[in-house]
Amino acid sequence: MKAVITCIFLVLSAFISCVTMSANMTIIRSPQVFTIKPPTAGNYPQGLYKYPYKPGTPENELFTQTLEWSPEVSKTFTVNTKYTATLTLNPVDKKHTFRGTSRSDVIGLPAENVENISVETKDRSLVIKIDFEPTAGVNDAPQIIFSDDFNGTTLDKTKWELCPENDRQGRSSWRNDMVSVSNGYLHIKFMRDKALGRSKTNNKALADNWIRGGGIRTISKDNYPIFENGYGYYEARIKFPAVSGTWGAFWLMSRTQWITSDEGIDGTEIDIVETINNHESKYNAALHWNGYGSHHKSAGSGGVALPVNIYDGNFHIFTLDWSPSEYVFYVDGKEFWRSDGSAKFNNSGINQNPNYIKLTVEGSAWVGMLPEGFTEDEMLVDYVRVYNQPRN
């Protein structure tokens, strides 16, 4: 009898606990996940790390998404290999849970080349395991996943948006009329604008050296991603002028760079090339993470030998090879900097979340004043391309 009473007590306790949890928690219904593409030999993997946004929107989800591959992928998917993708959904609010969520509730699960999908709850989280069929016996051919050759007469709004007309670096402003497309090039013009400077500052030296510049990006004015991507091979052919106090840049911006908890894994600004101190024939690559406030951290190529003079009046090709284990930066096919994020390979410091592309020109007093007599110049971009696998 005592055993029976004990059993009844345990069942009632479990029931009361379940009712209490249901009363205090809200089940996240019909979660939409980022669709995971089947592994393809030779291609970079996808990456997500505590990613908070709903797919294709600027809106925060009730949960974050983290993607892991097994076996671990250091560069690209290998041939004849079976991979498992583990996608973990973690509720942001402690009052939310995935308990009671089944596979049929999840939106966006892949179907192509899938052997099995299992879904289970762990504490309040949902863990989705996707077993894919083995990759092919040979590497797939590379594909361009984003490109623009600027062959039209206007900016292609299906690919780009003008950067907001913001003030930059305390001595420049982006303005839409500085950007145009003609003769097969993107033109980002920049000019001395004393009148604009006087409307921004009472400091005569800053006002007299104020730059009116501009830029474009692959995200809308409302922060909807037009194109964003993670691991990939990013390339642009650009002609940069040398004008002290200004710089042009080809860079990738992270919508999650503001997160300060995971040392850049969760979001990193990646500057593929910045022509800072161009009047001294210098340029650099750089990384910025943990926001731009007190937690901000950065690393850059300053001090490394530069293999090419990019201020010779010609176009040059600037490249980033971004993989799970490192960033590698090239100019005209010659490496000039790389960063693996940490001494050991555990992805620490390497951004796993998608970024969008930016091409800009701005100015600042901390890189010098404008040359005497300077009026205007421009940065020319011949093309931008993003590949799904390394090209070197």
Image (cartoon, grey):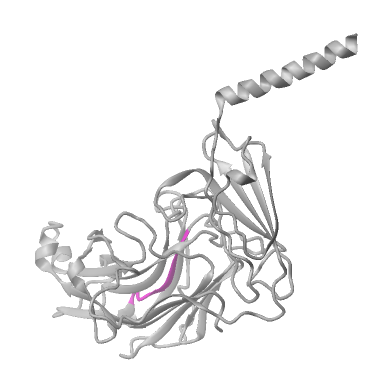
Specify whether residue 270 is painted magenta: yes
Count of picture labels: 0
Return the residue found at the far top: 1
Left-right relation of 81 to 182? right
- Pick the residue in front: 218 or 151: 151
Q: Picture coordinates of residue 13 (x, y %)?
A: 73, 17
Please say whether residue 204 is visible from this viewpoint.
no
Q: Give the residues in magenta.
A: 268-277
Name the quadrant containing residue 202: bottom left
The quarter in which the N terminus is drawn is top right
The quarter in which the C terminus is drawn is bottom right
Name the quadrant containing residue 227: bottom left
Specify whether residue 40 is painted magenta: no
- The residue drawn where x is 73% and y is 66% is 82
- Pick the residue in front: 34 or 209: 34
Left-right relation of 78 to 93? right
- The residue drawn where x is 39% and y is 51% is 58
